[in-house]
Image (cartoon, rainbow, N blue to C red):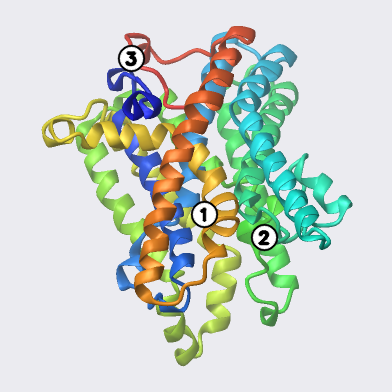
């Protein structure tokens, strides 16, 4: 009975396994970071954590690759950019993300109000003006995200990227010379977003004193509109340079370089090496680096692994034999639900109500946390997220895929 309750019944043969691996790694890294909260003062840190890539940044690149590919193929198939293409693009993106988000957001608001009513105390929700911003993804548009549901900073960046990127492409399509090929227009669009956002960060980084710290750029929409564009750049390479993209030699070389650079980027920004910056007297340079060059560095390094992972179509050998592939696909499918549920709804609302009185208690809380995250996320995906996505397919036009995907594979959106 439990097996049927939690089974997703999804065929692995219709998915790109490498992209599932990337998404599973990204969400497991994010949830692992939040799981450490349960250990409290008993968490002593681990060196290997300093070498793990930022799961959220990996999500950004993967999302940019998938969504950017859809946008580019839609543009190429139609031969022009117009309102119908834009509306269909937004409809399909928002049916994929908004229902789950509003369900969890509404649930958190209801739980907070219910607890306040039962205790007779005033609720802990932010002021109405701030709370309303969450419904329009404005909670971190130009400043730090408030304490309430803080993990949504990254979703806000994605949602605004889904708005700005196609709008910029539409404008470029209208204002650039008509004789320009669509390939050039797409490239100009991607570079405009990347260069424009980096210039904004660079100029403000020069204007604000180093003593102000990193400025929280990582979680501010205006400073991160380029976040998914490095993945879109990979989608551009796949669309217009298929020979190089499918070259096994090129894929393996880029994978090696991408992994090395990603680890270096993670380590260069880690708490472990922060002491070295302070002792060596180069802490101001580190702060400037984290305001500016770190973001394109981590984005481009992760984008380099995309050709190899996109070419990893099927799970073979031990991956399939021992059920690892099925587990990875399962985690990939429920990753968005895991993202929404793990920190505030489960860790802060449930797990942290029990004090961590010892290391044993801490690890017990971690174990319960993981069980709840995977279990509840599976149920949320199966009985809400998946049906809503299927509804999307009935009311909007399916977007074009590459020829290799038309043979039975689909993009792991």
The local secondary structure at tag 1 comes to helix
* Distance of label 1 from label 3 (alpha carbons): 30 Å
Q: Which residue is mark 3?
A: 404
Q: Residues within 10 Å of mark 2 (few under 14, many from 20)?
A: many
Q: Residue at x 56, y 55 (%)?
A: 350
Q: Which residue is mark 2?
A: 201
Q: Residue at x 48, y 59 (%)?
A: 34
Q: Nearer the viewer, residue 25 or 89?
A: 25
**Residue 296 numbered mark, or none:** 1
Tell us which disc is closer to us: 1 or 3: 3
Q: Describe residue 69's horizontal placement relative to residue 99 as left or right.
A: left
Q: Residues within 10 Å of mark 3 (few under 14, many from 20)?
A: few
| The N terminus sits in image quarter | top left
Q: Describe residue 207's horizontal placement relative to residue 195 as left or right.
A: right
Q: Nearer the viewer, residue 356 or 100?
A: 356
Q: Position of residue 33 (x, y in %)?
A: 45, 60
The local secondary structure at tag 3 comes to helix
Q: In the displayed structure, would residue 152 be above or below residue 143?
A: above
Q: Give the mark nearest the N terminus, 3 or 2.
A: 2
* Distance of label 3 from label 2 (alpha carbons): 39 Å
Dividing the picture into quarters, in which one does residue 86 lie? top right
Judge whether residue 233 can be spotted in this image. no
Q: Residue at x 47, y 34 (%)?
A: 65
Callouts 3 and 2 close, C-beta under 8 Å: no
Q: Position of residue 56 (x, y in %)?
A: 50, 50
Callouts 1 and 2 close, C-beta under 8 Å: no
Tell us which disc is closer to us: 3 or 2: 3
Q: Position of residue 328 (x, y in %)?
A: 31, 37
Q: Give the mark nearest the N terminus, 1 or 2.
A: 2
Dividing the picture into quarters, in which one does residue 84 lie? top right
């Amino acid at each position: 009975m439990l097996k049927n309750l939690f089974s997703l019944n999804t065929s692995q043969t219709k998915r790109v396994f490498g992209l599932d691996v990337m998404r599973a790694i990204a969400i497991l890294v994010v949830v692992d970071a939040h799981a450490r909260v349960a250990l409290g003062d008993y968490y002593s840190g681990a060196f290997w954590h300093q070498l793990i890539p930022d799961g959220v940044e990996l999500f950004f690149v993967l999302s940019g690759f998938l969504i950017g590919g859809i946008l580019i193929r839609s543009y190429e198939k139609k031969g022009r950019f117009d309102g119908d293409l834009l509306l269909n693009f937004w409809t399909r993106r928002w049916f994929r993300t908004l229902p789950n988000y509003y369900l969890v957001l509404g649930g958190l608001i209801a739980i907070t109000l219910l607890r306040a009513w039962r205790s007779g105390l005033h609720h802990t929700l932010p002021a109405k003006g701030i709370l309303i911003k969450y419904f329009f993804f404005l909670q971190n548009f130009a400043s730090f995200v408030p304490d309430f549901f803080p993990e949504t900073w990254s979703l806000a960046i994605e949602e605004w990227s889904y708005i700005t990127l196609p709008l910029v492409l539409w404008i470029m399509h209208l204002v650039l010379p008509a004789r320009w090929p669509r390939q050039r227009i797409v490239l100009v669009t991607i570079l405009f977003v990347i260069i424009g956002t980096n210039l904004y960060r660079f100029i403000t980084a020069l204007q604000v004193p180093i003593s102000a710290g990193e400025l929280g750029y990582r979680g501010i929409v205006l400073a991160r509109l380029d976040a998914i564009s490095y993945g879109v750049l990979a989608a551009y390479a796949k669309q217009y340079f298929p020979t190089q993209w499918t070259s096994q030699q090129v894929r393996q070389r880029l994978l090696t370089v991408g992994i090395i650079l990603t680890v270096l980027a993670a380590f260069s920004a880690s708490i472990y090496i922060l002491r070295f910056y302070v002792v060596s007297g180069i802490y101001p340079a580190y702060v400037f680096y984290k305001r500016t060059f770190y973001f394109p560095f981590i984005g481009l390094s992760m984008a380099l692994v995309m050709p190899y992972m996109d070419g990893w179509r099927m799970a073979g050998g031990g991956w399939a034999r021992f059920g690892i592939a099925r587990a990875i696909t399962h985690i990939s499918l429920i990753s968005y639900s895991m993202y929404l549920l793990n920190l505030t709804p489960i860790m802060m609302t449930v797990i942290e109500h029990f004090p961590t009185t010892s290391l044993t208690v801490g690890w017990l809380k971690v174990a319960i946390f993981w069980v709840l995250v995977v279990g509840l996320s599976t149920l949320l995906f199966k009985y809400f997220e998946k049906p809503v996505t299927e509804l999307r397919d009935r009311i909007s036009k399916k977007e074009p895929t590459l020829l290799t995907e038309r043979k039975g594979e689909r993009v792991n959106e």
